[in-house]
Amino acid sequence: MTADTPDTPILSVRALTKTYGARIGCEDISLDVWPGEVLAIVGESGSGKTTLLNCISARLPRSSGEVLYRMRDGETRDLDDLSEAERRFLARTDWGFVHQNPADGLRMRVSAGANVGERLMAVGERHYGQIRETATDWLGRVEIASDRIDDQPVAFSGGMRQRLQIARNLVTRPRLVFMDEPTGGLDVSVQARLLDLLRQLVADLGLAVVIVTHDLAVARLLSQRMIVMKDGHVIESGLTDRVLDDPQHAYTQLLVASIPES
Ligand SMILES: Nc1ncnc2c1ncn2[C@@H]1O[C@H](COP(=O)(O)OP(=O)(O)OP(=O)(O)O)[C@@H](O)[C@H]1O
């Protein structure tokens, strides 16, 4: 049983600041992520998106502030108070992290099936036949033909690698998935297909997602809410449609004006 009720955030960030020496990565950021919602963090290069994502996913130590996570048992914990083993367990089970570069999230020299199966084994699945069956099912869900199950990702195209990384992340049914420019390095046509697939999977699984993107079209397609960052600060936030259709801040207006008409 999970404690995912729509009226309680799954993740709450309070006054988070990260500095690199004298340089500000991000400053005084507060946000909530609700069960089943996609929150986009947008902004130009250097605005602090990746710093924020890495801090809230416990991949990077923060300088100050709190990150509160609602565990499966309903208890809310500050990530700082978790032991290293508890944090690792969360990262393997409750959370997913989809990197822009699939090579950062895959083991490139083990088979596609093992890349997916490994995550299942990490949550205690031991039955080889069952693991292979689930892996095959997930390859199908991300549109990778089952006869590629024994191939290594080095032999896959960029789009296939990214779809495999997504399968590896979602196979354990995480409650919260972090994504850093998941369509970033791909051709436009491959991006469109991947976005469709992501949108479908996120809806089917009812996932909560925090996605970093500099591409407002990606934010429009995937997210319900967004925050806009500039120079390490949040300058605007709200429902995605509201922010994109009626941006309040001059900087957001500029960003929106630069989206090509589709
Ligand atoms: N390891 C680091 N050491 C020092 N400064 C850093 C480091 N990582 C990021 N920064 C600085 O923090 C600020 C925010 O960078 P960050 O990478 O979070 O932005 P971003 O919006 O994700 O940009 P991009 O889209 O280009 O990745 C920038 O000024 C950057 O130079």
Image (cartoon, helix red, strand yellow):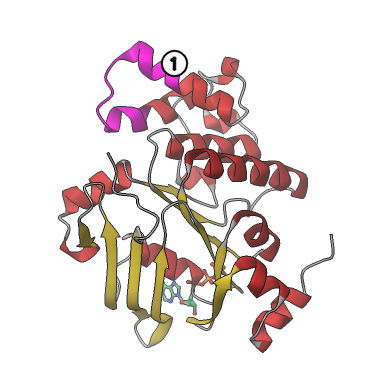
The region drawn magenta spans 118-134
Magenta stretch holds residue 131: yes
Which of the pair 205/143 is nearer the observer?
Answer: 205
* Residue 107 appearing in the image: no
Q: Is residue 52 left or right of residue 181?
A: left
Q: Residue at x 31, y 60 (%)?
A: 58
* Total numbered labels placed on residues in the image: 1
Could you tell me which residue is drawn at 42 percent across and 59 percent down? Answer: 34
Query: For the residue labelled by badge 1, is the local secondary structure a helix, a strand or a loop?
Result: helix
Name, please, the residue furthest toward the right: 261
Q: Quadrant of the C terminus?
A: bottom right
As shown in the figure, which amino acid type bears the numbered disc 1? Glu
In the rendered image, residue 209, in percent from the top left (x then y), is placed at 47, 54
Left or right? Give the position of 250 relative to 112.
right
Mark 1 sits on what residue?
Answer: 133
Q: Residue at x 70, y 61 (%)?
A: 217
- Say which quadrant the N terminus sits in: top left
Position in image of residue 107 (x %, y %) = 43, 36
Instruction: Specify the quadrant of the image occupied by residue 219.
Output: bottom right
Q: Nearer the viewer, residue 8 or 179?
A: 8
Q: Position of residue 56 (x, y in %)?
A: 36, 64
* Rendered view: 255 above or below 190: below
